[in-house]
């Protein structure tokens, strides 16, 4: 992994966080130079807090507070600890050593509240290697710009379409330039969910399954790179396989691109680390991506409607996880 980091500026992050994990396996993965960062989301925190006993004492102590206050105390503690562990990596390279925290997903339609919460969370954790995750929605784009203009690193999330990727890059590019090119940012392209949604449709149209996610993500990568801003990188997310016929590391093997990040589940990372499959020939040319989308149009497959469904489903899923978590922690 270290060679890929040096040769093509590719970083591998883990898409998982949990308190006991941070004090054990997380540090081993970093020490062995397997990962260079991490990401979280409301669903990851919900699963961690609900299934792990590591949070019970803190939840009990904080019961006099509101459910959201308890949640923020818990997640900020974990994110702060992850940032501390990752700090030596960040000190060596400002491209590495980041941990991401998402704003309240219920705020995705409110520019002002998203912006204010992003600033508050960043200042509360008080580590410069924390990225604030903002959903790629009409209200999210200006919030991304304002935060990066303030020098706050941003992870633009729930990106499914090239159009979303462009809108994110426009917002981040403007904010980074306005802020004196201080803030690093990533644009998180969700990959496997597109395959899961469209595999049956593609098979019925005599097209290969489990390909559109990678082709779509590659097209987004090309669009982001056209901004030629070294402070903006593509991050490939939603890289856990949802098809039993695929190897666990499928979405890592096929998305190792120059100047990019891949955040993946622990098992996918372990499987990839065994074989470390990498070939520059895996990268699809942009013209091939465009030709594929033309084929979809000819077969009357309306990809735009599927992008919209995935975004709405993603927003709903994160809000549901957030609400379930708040209900769980307020005893």
Image: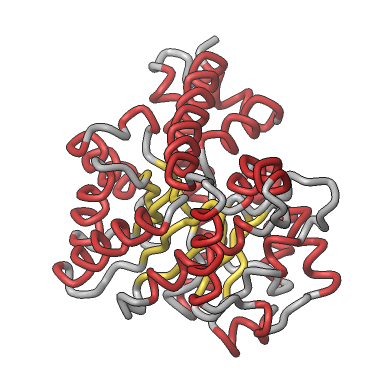
Which color scheme did the rendering employ for the protein? secondary structure
Q: Is residue 255 above or below residue 312?
A: below
Residue at the bottom extreme, as displayed: 7
Expressed as whole percent of the image width and height from the top left, the position of residue 148 reads 25, 60
Residue at the left extreme, as displayed: 178
Total tally of numbered discs in the picture: 0
In percent of the image, x 42 and y 13: which residue is there? 64
In percent of the image, x 27 and y 32: which residue is there? 109
Question: Is residue 136 or residue 195 the one in the foreground?
Answer: 195
Question: Is residue 10 or residue 214 the one in the foreground?
Answer: 214
Expressed as whole percent of the image width and height from the top left, the position of residue 285 reads 54, 79
The N terminus lies in quadrant: bottom right
Residue 25 quadrant = bottom right
Q: Is residue 269 above or below residue 91?
A: above
The C terminus lies in quadrant: top right
Residue at the top extreme, as displayed: 331
Expressed as whole percent of the image width and height from the top left, the position of residue 85 reads 56, 61
Expressed as whole percent of the image width and height from the top left, the position of residue 118 reads 29, 44
Task: State left or right for residue 74 relative to residue 172.
Answer: right
In percent of the image, x 39 and y 32: which residue is there? 105
Task: State left or right for residue 98 relative to residue 85.
Answer: left
Could you tell me if residue 19 is visible in this image? no
Task: State left or right for residue 10 relative to residue 106.
Answer: right
Task: State left or right for residue 201 relative to residue 261.
Answer: right
Could you tell me if residue 328 is visible in this image? yes
Q: Is residue 115 above or below residue 145?
A: above
């Amino acid at each position: 992994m270290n060679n890929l980091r040096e040769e093509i500026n590719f970083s591998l992050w883990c898409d998982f966080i949990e308190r006991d994990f941070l004090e054990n396996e997380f540090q081993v993965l970093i020490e062995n130079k397997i990962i260079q960062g991490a990401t979280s989301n409301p669903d990851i925190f919900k699963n961690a807090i609900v299934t792990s006993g590591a949070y019970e004492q803190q939840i009990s102590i904080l019961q006099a507070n509101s459910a959201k206050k308890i949640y923020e105390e818990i997640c900020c503690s974990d994110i702060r600890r992850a940032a501390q562990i990752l700090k030596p990596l960040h000190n060596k390279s400002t491209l590495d050593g980041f941990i991401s925290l998402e704003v309240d997903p219920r705020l995705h339609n409110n520019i002002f509240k998203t912006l204010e919460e992003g600033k508050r969370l960043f200042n509360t954790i008080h580590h410069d290697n924390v990225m604030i995750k903002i959903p790629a929605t009409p209200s999210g784009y200006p919030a991304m710009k304002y935060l990066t203009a303030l020098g706050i690193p941003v992870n633009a999330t729930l990106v499914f379409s090239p159009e979303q990727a462009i809108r994110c890059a426009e917002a981040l590019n403007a904010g980074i330039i306005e802020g004196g090119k201080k803030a690093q940012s990533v644009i998180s392209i969700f990959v496997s969910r597109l395959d899961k949604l469209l595999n049956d449709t593609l098979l019925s149209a005599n097209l290969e399954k489990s390909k559109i996610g990678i082709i779509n993500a590659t097209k987004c990568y090309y669009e982001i790179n056209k901004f030629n801003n070294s402070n903006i990188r593509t991050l490939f997310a939603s890289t856990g396989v949802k098809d039993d016929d695929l190897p666990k590391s499928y979405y890592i093997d096929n998305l190792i691109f120059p100047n990019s990040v891949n955040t993946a589940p622990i098992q996918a990372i372990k499987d990839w680390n065994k074989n470390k499959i990498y070939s520059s020939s895996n990268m699809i040319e942009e013209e091939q991506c465009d030709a594929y989308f033309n084929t979809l149009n000819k077969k009357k497959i309306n990809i735009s409607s599927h992008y919209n469904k995935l975004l709405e489903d993603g927003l709903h899923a994160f809000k549901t996880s957030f609400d379930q978590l708040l209900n769980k922690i307020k005893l």
